[in-house]
């Protein structure tokens, strides 16, 4: 029997996970196309935090978070370093009752899954994990020592290695330039050096999807938010304690060697504010630099309030990445009005957490047509009434 031929566009953490999961079905012949190197897009700019609890993703998606964490830790167990795990633990600092309730729920969920987690209110206990904290206005903090951050580029390459071992094909430095169609159905694609026939094409092109989807006549409601990262050199060049992964409602931070990686929280971004969001060309991004004074000042104000000693840090370097955000800050997954064109896009600030579950569920859908709870909850059709999804070359503004 002829195999189902599937092409995946994009070799970020999402496309790599989709490709790997598709390669697990022996009747699927999967090929992945990446115009650059695997994991070199948004994935390479990521903080890679996959925490057992924080406020980045609603608890409704707890299974997605847990599956993500377990997938990467299992990768590490199979081969040390293959997911680039840094076990820093996470301190979620609660400055209002809403976040406190949210964190306490996260702690309960993590414990239910067998992990150690606790809610701290004793100032000395909180300071033990983050000695530089200013506790004024702090209600308490959630702590787990079991999680931290991963290296998503390394994890994407591990997915791809496993995909190849299962017979999947990977084309790096191969740009998809055209998607071929017959009527309303995709039939294949053309790259900078060849053409391929496919039954199904999965678009996992991250912030490029605004351009890729136009190849099939769709305008996706996805905006780019600026993810501006600043690497601080702490006072005396080195901290005298292990810096944790640190989550505040408005920003987050984690160690990067002896430096501190610090970034504005993705859920604080306003899609209608041109300083925060727009539709920009991700190919114009540079590996470092390109950041705005606005975001640096914002983060310094946060530090002034929450950890004033760290204001004495120097700035080592910075970078800018684009998060691909739909209006509800949740991914767009599954089928589209174009037959055979499937989406695994719009992962915004949570793509590393979400990639394992997205890969698993998109593969199930492509292979058997079965929609998981995740795919039923996050289809493109949820935006049909609000946006004209036909590509017209006009950028629509979110409401
Ligand atoms: C600063 C920052 C911090 C973040 N922190 C976290 C975090 O702590 N935890 C978390 O879960 N998430 C985090 N994220 C979000 C996460 O990194 C992204 O959601 C995730 O990397 C998106 O992966 P992707 O595979 O969808 O996109 P990408 O990694 O951008 O991959 C898309 C790929 O498609 C390729 N492509 C595009 N067009 C074509 C074409 N025509 N032909 C072939 N290939 C093409 C691109 O080259 C690219 O490699 C962060 C993001 C940023 C920027």
Image (tube, helix red, strand yellow):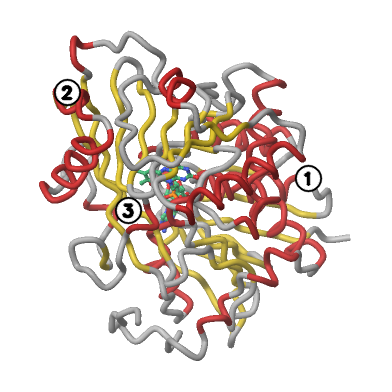
N-term mark: 1 or 3: 1
Q: Is residue 187 visible?
A: no
Question: Which image quadrant: the N terminus?
Answer: bottom right
Please tell me the numbered disc located at residue 24.
1
- Report the disc number at residue 309: none
User: Image quadrant of residue 276?
Assistant: bottom left
- Judged from the image, the secondary structure of the residue bearing numbered disc 3 is strand
Distance between the alpha carbons at the discs numbered 2 and 3: 26 Å
Disc with the residue nearer the chain's start (2 vs 3): 2
Q: Nearer the viewer, residue 191 or 234?
A: 234
Frontmost residue, 161 versus 117: 117
Nearest the viewer among 232 and 187 is 232
Mark seen at residue 322: 3
Which residue is at a point 30% across and 49% down the rendered structure image? 227
Looking at the image, residue 75 lies above or below residue 385: above
Is the CB of the residue bearing disc 3 within 8 angstroms of ligand 1? Answer: yes
Q: CA distance from mark 1 to mark 3?
A: 31 Å
Q: Residue 216: percent from the left, percent from the top? A: 48, 77
**Residue named by callout 2:** 313
Label 2 crowd bin: few (<14), some (14–19), many (20+), radius 10 Å: some
Query: Crowding at label 3, few (<14), some or many (≥20) Cα neighbours within 10 Å?
Result: many
Q: Is residue 34 above or below residue 241?
A: below
Of discs 1 and 3, which sits in the foreground? 3
């Amino acid at each position: 029997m002829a195999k189902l031929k599937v092409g995946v566009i994009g070799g970020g953490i999402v496309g790599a996970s989709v490709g790997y999961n598709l390669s697990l079905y022996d009747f699927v012949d999967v090929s992945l196309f990446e115009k650059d190197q695997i994991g070199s897009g948004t994935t390479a700019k990521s903080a890679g935090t996959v925490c057992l609890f924080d406020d980045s993703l609603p608890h409704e998606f707890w299974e997605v978070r847990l599956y993500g964490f377990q997938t990467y830790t299992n990768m590490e167990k199979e081969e040390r370093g293959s997911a680039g795990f840094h076990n820093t633990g996470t301190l979620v600092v609660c400055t209002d009752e809403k976040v406190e309730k949210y964190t306490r729920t996260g702690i309960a969920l993590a414990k239910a899954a067998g992990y150690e987690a606790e809610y701290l209110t004793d100032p000395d206990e909180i300071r033990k994990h983050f000695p530089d904290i200013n506790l004024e206005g702090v209600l308490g903090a959630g702590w787990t020592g079991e999680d931290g951050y991963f290296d998503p580029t390394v994890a994407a390459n591990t997915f791809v290695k496993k995909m190849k071992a299962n017979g999947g094909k990977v084309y790096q430095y191969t740009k998809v330039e055209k998607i071929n169609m017959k009527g309303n159905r995709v039939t294949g694609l053309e790259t900078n050096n060849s053409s391929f026939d496919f039954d199904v094409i999965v678009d996992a092109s991250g912030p490029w999807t605004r351009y890729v989807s136009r190849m099939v006549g769709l305008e996706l409601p996805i905006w780019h938010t600026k993810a501006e990262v600043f690497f601080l050199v702490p006072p005396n060049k080195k901290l005298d304690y292990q810096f944790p992964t640190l989550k505040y409602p408005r920003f987050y931070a984690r160690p990067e060697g002896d430096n501190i990686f610090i970034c504005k929280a993705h859920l604080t971004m306003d899609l209608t504010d041109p300083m925060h969001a727009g539709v920009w060309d991700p190919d114009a991004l540079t590996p470092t630099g390109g950041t705005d004074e606005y975001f640096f000042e914002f983060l310094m104000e946060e530090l002034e309030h929450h950890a004033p000693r760290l204001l004495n840090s120097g700035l080592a370097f910075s970078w800018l990445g684009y998060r691909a955000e739909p209006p509800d800050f949740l991914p767009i997954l599954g089928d589209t009005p174009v037959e055979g064109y499937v989406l695994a896009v719009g992962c915004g600030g949570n793509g590393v957490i979400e990639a394992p579950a997205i890969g698993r569920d998109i593969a199930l859908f492509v292979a058997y047509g079965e929609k998981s709870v995740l795919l039923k909850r996050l289809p493109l059709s949820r935006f049909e009434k609000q946006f004209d999804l036909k590509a017209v070359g006009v950028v629509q503004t979110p409401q």
